[in-house]
Image (tube, helix red, strand yellow):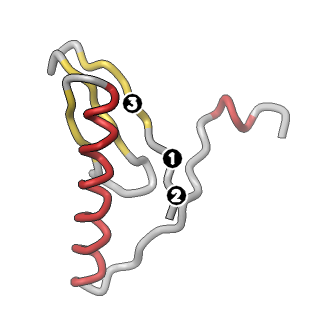
């Protein structure tokens, strides 16, 4: 599944945070945006595997940032 990923600088952590809004609590840290993206892809795989092992529903990708919603 292709989920939207947010990547942003965290002053507090002095690095980049990547998160997947559709997967509650799925986020990762990296010193660069690319590293954060790589790490969140690993976290996404682990999140989905954990949900499957617990028979929990996996939400479909539906998050769209407001910038993409304007004019649609």
Q: Nearer the viewer, residue 39 or 52?
A: 39
Mark on residue 7?
3
Badge 2 local density, few (<14 within 10 Å), some, or many (20+)? Answer: few
Q: Which residue has dot 2 on it?
A: 2
> Which residue occupies 73% across, 38% down?
69
| Snapshot quadrant of residue 13 | top left
In space, the residues marked 3 and 1 are separated at their CA atoms by 10 Å
Question: Which secondary structure lies at badge 3?
Answer: strand
Q: Nearer the viewer, residue 35 or 71?
A: 35
> Which residue occupies 22% across, 73% down?
50
Q: Position of residue 71 (x, y in %)?
A: 84, 33
Mark on residue 43?
none
Badge 3 local density, few (<14 within 10 Å), some, or many (20+)? Answer: many
Name the residue furthest right: 71
Q: Position of residue 36 (x, y in %)?
A: 28, 35
Q: Which residue has dot 1 on it?
A: 4
């Amino acid at each position: 599944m292709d989920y939207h990923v947010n990547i942003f600088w965290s002053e507090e952590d002095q690095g980049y945070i990547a998160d997947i809004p559709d997967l509650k609590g799925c986020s990762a840290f990296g010193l660069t945006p690319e590293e954060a993206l790589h790490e969140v892809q690993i976290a996404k795989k682990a999140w989905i595997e954990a949900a499957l092992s617990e028979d929990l529903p996996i939400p479909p990708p539906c998050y769209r940032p407001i910038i993409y919603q304007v004019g649609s």
